[in-house]
Amino acid sequence: MIHSDASRPKDECGVCGIFGHEDAAKLTYFGLYALQHRGQESAGIVASDGSQISLHKGMGLVHEVFSEATLQELKGHLTVGHVRYSTTGASNIINAQPFTATHQGCTVAVAHNGNLVNIRSLRNELEKKGSIFQSTMDSEVVVHLLARCSHLGLEKALIDTFESIKGAYSILLMTEDKLIAVRDPGGFRPLCLGKLNNGGFIVASETCALDLIEAQYVRDIEPGEILIIDREGQHSLHLEHSQRRSFCIFEQVYFARPDSDIFGKNVYQSRKRMGEILARECKIQADFVMPFPDSGNYAAIGFSQASGIPLEMGVIRNHYVGRTFIQPTQSMRDFSVRVKLNPIRSFLKDKRVIILDDSIIRGTTGRSRVKSLREAGVKEIHMLISCPPSRNPCYYGIDFPSGGELIANKKTVEEIRDYLGLDSLYYLSLEGLLEACGGPPEDYCKACFDGDYPVAPDKEFCKLLLGTRNACQSTGKK
Amino acid sequence: MIHSDASRPKDECGVCGIFGHEDAAKLTYFGLYALQHRGQESAGIVASDGSQISLHKGMGLVHEVFSEATLQELKGHLTVGHVRYSTTGASNIINAQPFTATHQGCTVAVAHNGNLVNIRSLRNELEKKGSIFQSTMDSEVVVHLLARCSHLGLEKALIDTFESIKGAYSILLMTEDKLIAVRDPGGFRPLCLGKLNNGGFIVASETCALDLIEAQYVRDIEPGEILIIDREGQHSLHLEHSQRRSFCIFEQVYFARPDSDIFGKNVYQSRKRMGEILARECKIQADFVMPFPDSGNYAAIGFSQASGIPLEMGVIRNHYVGRTFIQPTQSMRDFSVRVKLNPIRSFLKDKRVIILDDSIIRGTTGRSRVKSLREAGVKEIHMLISCPPSRNPCYYGIDFPSGGELIANKKTVEEIRDYLGLDSLYYLSLEGLLEACGGPPEDYCKACFDGDYPVAPDKEFCKLLLGTRNACQSTGKK
Amino acid sequence: MIHSDASRPKDECGVCGIFGHEDAAKLTYFGLYALQHRGQESAGIVASDGSQISLHKGMGLVHEVFSEATLQELKGHLTVGHVRYSTTGASNIINAQPFTATHQGCTVAVAHNGNLVNIRSLRNELEKKGSIFQSTMDSEVVVHLLARCSHLGLEKALIDTFESIKGAYSILLMTEDKLIAVRDPGGFRPLCLGKLNNGGFIVASETCALDLIEAQYVRDIEPGEILIIDREGQHSLHLEHSQRRSFCIFEQVYFARPDSDIFGKNVYQSRKRMGEILARECKIQADFVMPFPDSGNYAAIGFSQASGIPLEMGVIRNHYVGRTFIQPTQSMRDFSVRVKLNPIRSFLKDKRVIILDDSIIRGTTGRSRVKSLREAGVKEIHMLISCPPSRNPCYYGIDFPSGGELIANKKTVEEIRDYLGLDSLYYLSLEGLLEACGGPPEDYCKACFDGDYPVAPDKEFCKLLLGTRNACQSTGKK
Amino acid sequence: MIHSDASRPKDECGVCGIFGHEDAAKLTYFGLYALQHRGQESAGIVASDGSQISLHKGMGLVHEVFSEATLQELKGHLTVGHVRYSTTGASNIINAQPFTATHQGCTVAVAHNGNLVNIRSLRNELEKKGSIFQSTMDSEVVVHLLARCSHLGLEKALIDTFESIKGAYSILLMTEDKLIAVRDPGGFRPLCLGKLNNGGFIVASETCALDLIEAQYVRDIEPGEILIIDREGQHSLHLEHSQRRSFCIFEQVYFARPDSDIFGKNVYQSRKRMGEILARECKIQADFVMPFPDSGNYAAIGFSQASGIPLEMGVIRNHYVGRTFIQPTQSMRDFSVRVKLNPIRSFLKDKRVIILDDSIIRGTTGRSRVKSLREAGVKEIHMLISCPPSRNPCYYGIDFPSGGELIANKKTVEEIRDYLGLDSLYYLSLEGLLEACGGPPEDYCKACFDGDYPVAPDKEFCKLLLGTRNACQSTGKK
């Protein structure tokens, strides 16, 4: 039983859909498996054999939610899958996706990655017309909108629905016989199309899902595109809009898997390039550079190559970590840091060290890690961050803490350096980051760094989305 | 993962709500525990502390769904609980109750026992106005209707909603601060009010729930009554209607617990009286009468007392039964019968036996049991049934098979006797049954016996409720 | 994790073995299923295909411990199974049976029902010779004794082992290719041989296990017999002894299933006869007699038939009970009684009632039940017990409390009546009980009633068996 | 239910014991958590409060086996814990450790890392004296030996027992009030002593366990030392022997955690040095060097620094991998490789790559990985291994496949290169490896490379340890 945490309506997620393969559910399972880093809270797959629709979803990791037996029950050549993420313990089966609903004999399923910024006014309007809501999911709103337009025919209903929606969405929709992929006009979140060996198709958040099931990458779904795949083939609709491209730069910095290509670039190489540019922007003397594994690994490699300062792995990651719920004893200070990363004391003693990491959010973890290095006898600790200070919340689907909790929102770089206990602290410049990511700088949303939000949110958006009376729900065996 | 079986939309259920006790969730737990016979498929409790609403529900028995921890999370003095029944393996967390929804900042929870007979037209109408549905539950329709009337104020909305609904319903509703109990104008299903030791209240399907938590029985909720309990006290609204009373006589025969009083009568005594009247209606020579335990126990006692024919327990019920999923081997014929009831061979050999049971639905189980007795050496087997032949489906919430599968719908009594392999077979007369149940005969719904349905169902009601495109859903860990 | 409770070394159990059936493990599963009343703490099956031996055991009910998959892994035509009982929450996988061990390349498995009374001196002697022990099971001692005699050949080793053992044992042994059934010279516990449809054999504690798998009862294993079944056929050895027969009379009163025949008698009929003799011994005026279901059911039928006093079911057993671990609230007094048995208040009010039950052990449960009946308005409560007062502990495998906790050990019948709050209390006489059970009175062990122990226990037997330093052990996932 | 695989009697394990801390069980839990890489099959902790001993063990990872509740039941200041490893799915609760037994009122618990090479003759001798065995664990033999010497007093019994044992053992023993650590005269496996903040002590396989609970490293347990810790303090006994030191060099190459110091050296630095020496021994032209993460990471860093060839991470490890049991579809070739490591196609195309890894055992995994790189378009693939060819089985506790399955046992380096599909293949020389590990070369056991076994095994040792009749056992819920 877990309460829904109304302060965290914005979740990062991953989606994967298959059209035209007899093992569609299994391929979707593996696609979600490769996208697990985009959401560990819940997973779900909905399948259709052309007339009958089946759904299975649950709380937990993909491999915990599905078994061979549940996959076999998900019959059909057409599937949509979803993984959902929550940074807190809060999780809620009512909010698990795909979301399905029936209206006048038709069933539609929706899986959503992103965040709608006019959700509040859309809901209010729908409620005024009589809609009731069971969840706090954007997807539920999408389905209501579609249902209310359904008399217009599918394509018109899609256009009308998505033209009324504002914000970030890479959405997969499924009807009994169609797979529909929609990407918002800004293209905040990645979404790509691949071709299966047998001629079928996959649409997924990242290319790493294509790799695992040996699909060939075809192209990205375009910003503002509605791609419809059915027995007749594929065709696309395009939303009318005046929105500039708004690729989420934080996907490159932090969120996407390094082996994925997103927004036309390989993530590993972008991250390595961030390290290289850091080496150009910032000259420090040190015995070596080391990442906090694995988040800083790739920028650290780039930095080492560009600066000539040797790369070392001075802290070791415990690969079995992350799941113990046993509380440490009183005497075990800084336990939560050491249980994940253990400094190699005999190696670090008396060294001058550059730490490379990809972000500082609240600063609390970093502070403990620095303290732990000091206790291991490190002489000098310099920290480089492979992006600018994260000063602003994200309205488009990445679950940053609210502004006040972001350390860079309240403190100067010098104050952060002091708080973390560092000898020095440097952030990659925004120009450097844009150079590392490649492509036209204006194609990125970098609001978390510069506060320039490409799509204005509702007035009420930043408040708790669904009010203080929101039901806390849980489902499942005790 | 279990498919929803669209041929079985009609389910018997149990409800229990508490107002005004700090341990409301725990009392509801025990109330549901006492009502477990009314539904073994899923269980749920929703609680409110006056502002915050929490819900926990899951598939399985009450003690499987809840733990001390989940009950503690269900904070507040106000609760509504539900157990749901399905005669097949089909079950579906999407259909578990209570059902909750939010509309314009208000949350309402619904738990329903019974079956609405104009659900199809209500849904159609709602869908035309834009409603979408996630489940096949009547409760979801009730919430939609309430939401659409909410601008009228709560009491008017309740009246309007329930005056638009036809069929059987003993419903508990909960808002943040009110417990509302509604019983349809026919009063098909039982629903009673009790008083807690501390001054709080309980509303439950049967009095056995009151007994377990030591509440005092106050009165039945009246047919057509809407009882509202809140901090101000209690008050009732009354639905306008011209409906005659329609107490479900099958609750007396079969469904309710023998220690409950329903419709003003004690069930144990009604069942015993059925046996007594059977003894008057039907004279047979035999060495003894025996029930199939425990369903025939009470009528058998009455029959024995009235006829002077000794009562015996010639078959023994295995109390650990009912949960093995291991398939028997080829050599184990009639296994499913013997695993539940084992004949005492040494006792039964060469005896003339009267079997007393409460119903014959499909006849398949009875046939196997008779065969098993023959193999144990019983010489003569006569069977008495404590009600008339069940010929017609129930539209009001008891999950009979459809007409064609009811053996008495297709066969004469003589043909049934022959099919079961009996020496003789007698049913209690409808007059005898009404005499046994007491009260004015016209106060009962006895449609399953005589086909006289007190509330006419929708034209489309008997077809699959929600069409062939209904989604099969499941939730939970694999 | 559950501590072994050294104050309760004596457990009742059930055993079942199969020889000569390809589905031996599955048949054993169902045999144990029918014997579940003899032990609910743990279950285990060991199987052999003639060379390879497999074992699966676990804590819990038979259907919880085994799945189709685990049964399929138990390959072979030869099996031994066991269910173990503990009246307390104490349970311990280390003590689960069958117990297996390897000695000089041979594996032997043992499943034991009963209790050895010279276990302490046998263990001391073995430890002096260098044996070490992992459990507190009698079975482990049996295996040590067998191993130390193994140079003598199997048959001599069996004779030597069992002639050194004193006490009650119905034991099944399995080697790679033999099923061996041994019953102590007193024959305390039942053990019977049946024939499978395919020509194979079953040995089980009670005939109800034979019934479920459709085996034909052949005969009881004789007291003092060692029956060896292998590919060559069957043959028996006989222990030399001067022990008189000592059939446990409490199996007839209480422990065995009513549909079993034990010691040559049907249990249902014995129990009914106890009621009949009670009616002869004890004349009371009352409105009706009623059992505490189901333990008093059969004697109540006999009593009613013999006395002419009508039988009623004034308290109703909740069939879903027995598994809730939720603590009641403060306000729910006598909860543990009412959760199992609910009095029918409207029926019991102002009645004069005779309660029939099969035993009073500590008296606490009975006292609460009587109180609960008084609260339901019963005017007079008379209680009849279908055996004499239980005054003495059992050394032979039934887990009575120690003498001091047996209410009849400390109080007179009048004091017990007063403690329970009864109007009158009568016990069946020992002569009456022996008459009801049939057969020569001297063939029964009735030590729990008269203190005449047919086999003298070790001096140290009554102390904690394995000393204060006994390890508390548990196994399994958290 | 899992069969014990008699072909794999040799298991690597980890041990951790605490003396003198009120949270001993919790500290042991975290010690085992840090040692999880040494054994993932089962975990167990035994605790003593000076008189009462408690044990909990189970199959699975440390965090799966223990909960806060089970840890709280493990009361006392004195504990011994164990993690056990099996490279196959085979696992068996009967073989889980610690192993406990009672003999003449004393309980002893044993946790063992290593492998005894005269186990067969010891067992034979014990069986001749009457011992029986339930498991295939070396620990069970140790307990039998101790029990048989117990009349000599503890210290003499320890000396006698361990002087009769041959092979590798880092053993922790616990009596009610003593923690005893024993390391074999060769010192094959690491074992170190640490001091807790509160003055208590920890003994553990590796220093990473000390780090996690913030204990200070004191010293290694010496080869041939028996260290006894109790309320009186510490004292040591020393086994008489003529055994040379035999530190397992494969711990440095592969098994120990890089943040541990073992045999007086830091593992990370040893592994980096292996890469440096490889760079000296082997000159190759390539675009970059990359490890198979994480096993080759550290040698790759050393190689890159010494050779000047850039380090890259061309394949990405899926951190959520390792637990899916869903079978891939037909079309997903080489799935088991890609699910763990995904090549970055856009980066690898047309490159000349040096792969660095720490070993080639069977060669099958390596072959698939190389194939996968070829498919990603890599032009040249050279592989460097940071140790010599593994040609011989280990008798001392590392679970290599038997000789015939080791690819280097059957094939020349050129044949292996061809089998793997490489452009070139180089192994580090034995001299190079010894130089990298530091210390006198003769202090290492390197039998897996050169076949020079420092302790001769029993004649029968290499056969299946316990014969073909060994029982397959499993325990637990289905």
Image (cartoon, coloured by chain):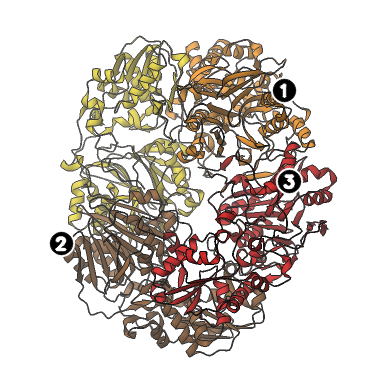
Chain colours: A yellow, B brown, C red, D orange
Residue at the location (78% across, 39% down)? Answer: C104
Q: Label 3: which residue?
A: C143
What is the CA distance from the residue labelled 2 to the residue labelled 1? 89 Å
Which residue is more in the foreground, C476 or A168? Answer: C476
Where C412 falls versus C73 (above or below)? Answer: below
Same-chain status of marks 2 and 1: no
Query: In this image, A366 relative to D149: left or right?
Result: left
Give the left or right position of residue C97, taking residue A166 as reference: right
Q: Mark 1 points at which residue?
A: D163
Q: Where is residue D36 in the image (x, y as percent from the top left)?
A: 52, 30
SS at mark 2 in the image: loop
Q: Which of marks 2 and 3 is in front?
A: 3
Q: In this view, does A180 lie to the left or right of C65?
A: left
Above or below B179: residue C136? above
The type of residue carrying mark 3 is Val
Mark 2 nearby-residue class (10 Å; few <14, some 14–19, many ≥20): few
Measured in 3D between alpha carbons, the distance from the residue under mark 2 to the one under mark 3, in whole angstroms, is 78 Å
Which quadrant of the view contains residue A104? bottom left
* Marks 2 and 3 belong to one chain: no
Picture quarter containing residue B244? bottom left
Q: Are marks 1 and 3 on the same chain?
A: no
